[in-house]
Amino acid sequence: MARSTLFRTVWMAAILAAGVPCAHAALDIGDPVPKFTATAALGGKTFRYSLAEALAKGPVVLYFFPAADSNDCSIEAHAFAEAVDQFAALGATVIGVSADDIDTLSKFSVKSCQSRFPVASDQGKTVIQGFDALMQTRPDFANRLSYVIAPDGKVAYYYQNLNPDKHVERMLNAVRALPKATAAK
């Protein structure tokens, strides 16, 4: 395991064990979200991701995560990868965002995301800040925060917890709860 990966894994475990408080989502249900474009990776290939273009096709599950290749972030990415077909059946797409560089995320998109959904790099943290996903205690990292965004560009649901276990389940339930016309755009 690379030294930086080991550091991130140990750091995330310490944060979870300490119960460090994190920022609360500033965007509430019904709030419009900031539209963004970012360099993303899918299956190891980079491209320009546009939230507006994704929303034109249906709801988007946007999730922020602290650090690619840390244990919990890999668990969460794997869980989203396993559920991509369920999201697609509901008309939704998934995108992950972190402050990692695109080279790191390109590898992560293959290894942990199983080439099933894109992950975007936000090294400048403009997207992370726009969604109030910056970790207060460690401003170099995004918090573990997931949003369901309706095609009208408004927050339909959000969930924040450093523990990755419930994010996919909660996002699936939230997409299922969207009005049929919204979910099947």
Image (cartoon, rainbow, N blue to C red):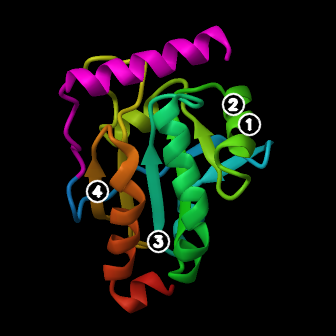
Per the image, label 3 sits on a secondary structure element best described as loop
Looking at numbered disc 1 in the image, what kind of residue is underneath it? Ser
Identify the mark nearer the N-term, 1 or 3. Answer: 3
Indicate yes or no whether the magenta region holds residue 4: yes
Q: Are marks 4 and 1 in contact (CB under 8 Å)?
A: no
> Disc number at residue 59?
3
Is 137 situated above or below 112? above
- Residue at the farthest right position: 45
Q: Nearer the viewer, mark 1 or mark 2?
A: 1
Q: Are marks 2 and 4 in contact (CB under 8 Å)?
A: no
Q: In the figure, residue 132 lies in which quadrant?
A: top left
- Give the Cα separation between the discs numbered 2 and 3: 25 Å
Question: Which residue is drawn at the image coordinates 32% and 37% (left, top)?
Answer: 162
State the SS at label 2: helix
> Which dot marks residue 102?
2
Mark 2 or mark 3, which has the lower sequence index?
3
Would you say 4 lies left or right of 18 here? right
Q: Position of residue 125 (x, y in %)?
A: 46, 28
Image mark for residue 106: 1
Q: Amino acid at mark 4?
A: Tyr
Cα–Cα gap, marks 1 and 3: 24 Å
Residue denoted by label 4: 158
Q: Amino acid at mark 3?
A: Pro
Q: Which residues are magenta?
A: 1-27
Amino acid type, callout 2: Ile
Front residue (pair 78, 153): 78
For the residues bearing labels 1 and 3, Cβ distance under 8 angstroms? no
